[in-house]
Image (cartoon, coloured by chain):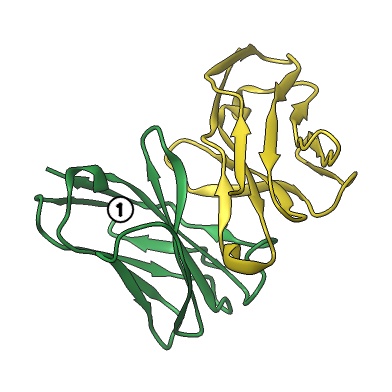
Chain colours: A yellow, B green
Amino acid sequence: GDSVTQMEGPVTLSEEAFLTINCTYTATGYPSLFWYVQYPGEGLQLLLKATKADDKGSNKGFEATYRKETTSFHLEKGSVQVSDSAVYFCALSEPDGGSQGNLIFGKGTKLSVKP
Amino acid sequence: EAGVTQSPTHLIKTRGQQATLRCSPISGHTSVYWYQQALGLGLQFLLWYDEGEERNRGNFPPRFSGRQFPNYSSELNVNALELEDSALYLCASSFRDRWNTEAFFGQGTRLTVV
């Protein structure tokens, strides 16, 4: 079945460091891909998305490019801030068949940014 | 505009009891989704309701059930609680058939089974 694998954390960085969180997926069709962020004590927020190959999603300085050839959707940010400390989830959705309504999530990567 | 709201925030139940969790979607959203976020397991899809009907179900036993009311709010019921049901239960909502692009999540209900 469809699945998402993301790098395990926790990831600890200093402020202004470069961030990469790896995400790869397995899917039978042509999924849409997402990054969600969960700040402490809050629900999930959609950070960015890409719906087809070579699309780049971007928001709040974060970017991720849908790479069909490597089945990847790595999250990057050039300069992290303390306020970026959160848990980041990679997810996919299949628009057809029995997976409708179902976002498939990775297990999450906890990011801590130190001043 | 109010976001997705869930109640209660925390719930403590004894093994074997029933738990009822509630979710109010964003105004205008007709679809409600339930997810379980258990420690070490990530988020797992439970149920999808739209226009009062169950549209899809994840790989959970029948003791996990729910319903959607005419105002599109939803309840998740968990019967015969087991210790491993302890988790954060997240509700999300979207416009119909927009689940893969515009799902908004609530803050969750933390269920603890003792």
Q: Is residue A27 above or below residue A63?
A: below
In this view, the residue in front, A90 or A112, is A90
Mark 1, secondary structure of its residue: loop
The residue lying at 58 percent from left, 55 percent from top is A103
How far across and down, in percent of the image, does residue A4 sit? 61, 39
Whether residue B104 is visible, yes or no, is: yes
Percent across and percent down for residue A13 are 63, 13
In the displayed structure, B69 sits above or below A11; it is: below
- In the picture of the structure, the residue carrying the numbered disc 1 is B9
Residue nearer the viewer, B64 or A83: B64
Q: Left or right: where does residue B77 sit relative to residue A65?
A: left
Q: Quadrant of residue A75?
A: top right
Residue toward you, A26 or B84? A26
Residue depicted at x 82% and y 42%? A66
Left or right of residue A10, residue A83 in this image: right
> Which chain is indicated by disc 1?
B
Residue B76 is at least partly visible in this image = no
| B93 relative position to B14: left or right | right
Name the residue at 47% across, 46% down: B43
**Is residue A98 left or right of A17 when viewed as pictured?**
left
Q: Identify which amino acid the numbered label 1 is placed on.
A: Thr
Residue B19 higher or lower than A62, as above or below: below
Q: Is residue B62 above or below residue A114?
A: below
Q: Residue at x 75, y 37 (%)?
A: A73
Quadrant into which the C terminus of chain A falls:
top right
